[in-house]
Image: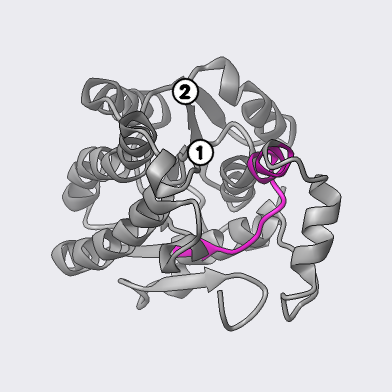
Amino acid sequence: MASPLARPLTDRVAFVTGAGRGIGAATAIRLAADGAKVAVVDLTDDAGKATVDTIQGAGGTAIAIGCDVSQRDQVEAAVERTVRELGGLHVLVNNAGVTRDNLLFKMTDDDWDTVIDIHLKGSFLCARAAQKHMVEQRWGKIVNLSSTSALGNRGQANYSTAKSGLQGFTKTLAIELGQFGINVNAVAPGYIDTEMTRLTSRRLGVDPEERMAEASKAIPLRRVGVPEDIAGVVSFLCGPDSSYVTGQVIYVAGGPRA
């Protein structure tokens, strides 16, 4: 955990979706280190257990909440449970996501609907439920996870559309919610070494390590990212040093171009 002198989110409560692994887990752990109590939200309670154990083992406070973010009743119940058990809701990180990659002529209706529902509808439902509490307290931070794929990526018409849509969603919420002291921003990761990207490599019949080594050659920093690279930027956007930053999309991709 961070030093007591560097805990900018003390007395704040964070709600992080897709927090059972990868970027979401790293973000939940980082926000806990910043002093926040964290609702670790994933599809099931068990999916978030390891993240909760890590936070609690370091002296932090966290609870695991099972929730399908594409379902309104589950989202509203998860938010209300967070407020009831942790004492409020101040920070929302919309990270939950899935991929169903395919070229357009092979993409099914379900491939499209699943990705759009989790990323876009899920972020909408979570933001709508969370903002009620943020507006009442005149303070809040919302961070949406976009992607460099928002700029277009072969085989990801569904994912690219969802991630691009989140950027417009972010800018619109910043305009609507700014008057209530709520900052809304987006982080767009590049190539990050996660279980999801490794599974994608294997699905393509490519060794994950070889794929990352090849990708690194085109990245100015000559490496792919790790979840903690994203968590650090999210931490900044959730803390006091970003109080005058809103409606922005920050690309975290190891270089100036995605």
Q: Which residue is nearer to you in this view: 1 or 188?
A: 188
Q: Quadrant of residue 165?
A: bottom left
SS label for mark 1:
strand
For residue 75, say whether it is visible. Answer: yes
Q: Quadrant of residue 175?
A: bottom left
Front disc: 1 or 2: 2
User: In the drawing, does residue 206 fall left or right of residue 61?
Assistant: right
Which residue lies at the image location 19% right of the left edge and 65% below the top edge? 172
Q: Which residue is nearer to you in this view: 142 or 210?
A: 210
Give the quadrant of the C terminus.
Answer: bottom right
Amino acid bearing label 2: Leu
Which residue lies at the image location 22% right of the left edge and 43% below the top edge? 133
Q: Quadrant of residue 127?
A: top left
Residue named by callout 2:
43
Q: CA distance from mark 1 to mark 2?
A: 20 Å
Mark 1: few/some/many CA within 10 Å (<14, 14-19, 20+): many
Measuring from the top left, give residue 115's x and y in whole percent.
38, 39
User: In the drawing, does residue 159 fall left or right of residue 88?
Assistant: right
Measuring from the top left, give residue 141's x and y in whole percent.
36, 57
Please state the extent of the stretch shown in magenta in the rendering. Answer: 187-202
For residue 15, say whether it is visible. Answer: no
Amino acid bearing label 1: Lys
SS label for mark 2:
loop
Measuring from the top left, give residue 41's x and y in whole percent.
47, 30
Which residue lies at the image location 66% right of the left edge and 46% below the top edge? 197
Mark 2: few/some/many CA within 10 Å (<14, 14-19, 20+): some
Whether 144 is drawn above or below 116: the answer is below
User: In the drawing, does residue 6 fall left or right of residue 187?
Assistant: right
Residue named by callout 1:
37
